[in-house]
Image: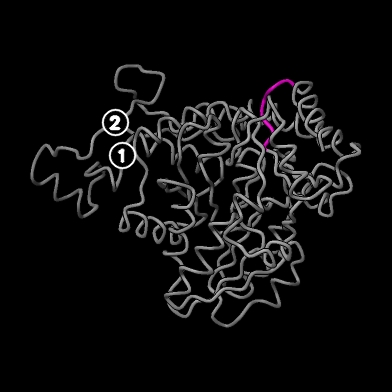
Amino acid sequence: MSLKHSKPGAGKFTRAIHGGEMDPSLFGEVSIPIFQTSTFAFPTAEEGAARFTGERPGYIYTRLKNPTIDALERCVADLEGAYAAAATASGMGAVSTVCFALLESGSHVVASEVLYGPSRVLIEREFSRFGVQATFVDTTDTGNVVQALRSNTRLVLLETPANPTMGVTDIQATADIAHDAGVILAVDNTFASPYLQRPLERGADVVIESCTKFLNGHADVVGGMVAARSETVYKRIRHALTLCGGTMDPHQAWLILRGVRTLPLRLERAQDNAMKLAFFLSDHPKVLWVKYPGLPDHPQHQIARKQMDGFGAMLCFGVRNGVQGGRTVMNHVQTITLAVSLGGVESLIEHPASMTHTGLSKEQREKAGIFDELIRLSVGCEDFEDLRDDLDRALEQV
């Protein structure tokens, strides 16, 4: 049994639907089976030994490899244009695996000052305990990356579009800067997903995805993925992952793979809603500003047009009366759900300064553009009119 590659030139819908299929199937099943087993039997002692040495392919133990997890990894690697991918137990498992694999004591990291809150906390407070240094800069200006590089820099980590400010960094320009210095570039692609953006095609070496979000799309499972452009970097990632044990469970993988099959359909619908809501909010008297890459007045609109196939389903906006105004809006929505996370079929609303980014000081948040009035909106697949009316009613309470 093996996993099929997509046909050369297949479109993104086709690859999402058929990526990772088994060839041949066991019984003609259309859905990938869940191989819910911790260990795999060997037909002979010689075969077991050969699998451990790598002389023969085959499965040994699910922490190392599993057919269901393999199917998801192959599918996402295909969508990302990667050499291979490694599935992790959570999105933060993906971030920590990359850091563990590519950094050592005395290493220096240049990272976007706007990152998912726990990603920054991990680097700034936890890896620093082991001698890893970090500089956080506004990567939307690539000149800041150039200035931040040091002789011991080993990793540049971007998040684009950024969480939650929607800043967009030029991936190709940053890759050129990093590679000229002999540094690996990793990009957190969670906000866009491989359907809308493929950083490896723009020169990145590693892509990080939170599978919890758009890839799964149904708010019912947690997972992560690391995809690498080269075999060398992939082997470092895979070694760190299996050694530390942050691997995915087969049932997780099956749920996420099921979600990937509808990724194009969901994201096309959600980003259509997001674009309409961005224009609606831009004209609302209770809204101070809106950040969405699809708006012509977004500072990096042209970069987004160049490197993305669409502008995505995430946006943020500032509401009058600061924190209290934001609370009022969030306490009065009815169709939109007040919850963290993103990328599901349902629309979610949250307040980063008091929720997802509380690990940063107020000074750090404001320097990164995460102001108290900022509300983050993950736009789902509901009827646009219902979402618009829901926000309008809530905003009128401000």
Residue that numbered label 2 is attached to: 35
Q: Is residue 309 above or below residue 357?
A: above
Rendered image quadrant of residue 204: bottom right
What secondary structure is the magenta-colored segment mainly? loop
Where's residue 329, x and y in %? 75, 37
Q: Secondary structure at mark 1?
A: loop
Range of magenta residues = 378-383
Query: Residue at position x 86%, y 35% from top?
Result: 279
Q: Secondary structure at mark 2?
A: loop
Q: Is residue 380 magenta?
A: yes
Please, what is the three-letter code of the amino acid marked with disc 1? Answer: Asn
341 displayed left or right of 285: left
The Cα–Cα distance between marks 1 and 2, rounded to whole angstroms, is 7 Å
Residue that numbered label 1 is attached to: 66
Where's residue 160, x and y in %? 67, 53
Please, what is the three-letter code of the amino acid marked with disc 2? Answer: Phe
The extreme top residue here reads 28
Q: Nearer the viewer, residue 335 or 133?
A: 335
Query: Residue at position x 69%, y 71% from top?
Result: 145
Image quarter hosting the N terminus: top left
